[in-house]
Image (tube, helix red, strand yellow):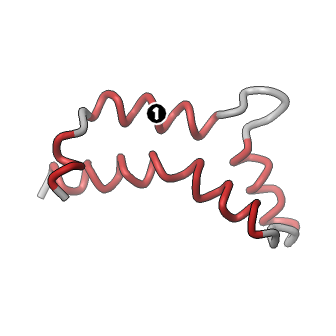
Amino acid sequence: MEWLDKLPISILVVVAVLMALAPFTPEPHLWEKYKMLRAGTLSRPLDIFDVFWHLLPTMLLIAKLVRMYR
């Protein structure tokens, strides 16, 4: 995963925070999807894809940090 090693960590942090909090109003998608998961209503494929899409930069950041400290 050489491409991940080349990505600057500062850019990953900014993108991860922005995607985790987007959209800022009325509430972030991740918070909305978390509430749907707790209620048992997170079943539509579009909602599941939305969770994946908003968490992807965070997962990349975690993978980069793991690779950096190995």
Q: Quadrant of residue 25?
A: top right
Position of residue 11 relative to residue 54, above or below, is above
Residue in front for this viewpoint, 38 or 28: 28
In this rendering, position of residue 49 left or right of residue 63 = right
Q: Which residue is mark 1?
A: 15
> In the picture, which quadrant includes the N terminus?
bottom left
The residue shown at (35%, 52%) is 62
Q: Residue furthest left?
A: 70
Give how far across and how far down residue 27 sits, in percent.
80, 35
**Label 1: few (<14), some (14–19) or many (≥20) C-alpha neighbours in 10 Å:** some
In the displayed structure, 69 sits above or below 14; it is below
Q: Residue at x 11, y 58 (%)?
A: 70
Secondary structure at badge 1 equals helix
Residue beneath the point at 24% across and 49% down: 4
In percent of width and height, residue 2 lies at 15, 53
**Number of callouts:** 1
Q: Is residue 16 left or right of residue 9?
A: right
Q: Is residue 12 above or below residue 36?
A: above
Given residues 58 and 53, the one toward you in this image is 53
| In the foreground, 36 or 11 | 11
> Which of the 4 quarters of the picture holds residue 7?
top left
The amino acid type, in three-letter code, at marker 1 is Val
Residue 39 percent location from the top left of the image: 88, 66
The residue drawn where x is 69% and y is 48% is: 30
Q: How far across and down, in percent of the image, does residue 63 sit?
A: 30, 56
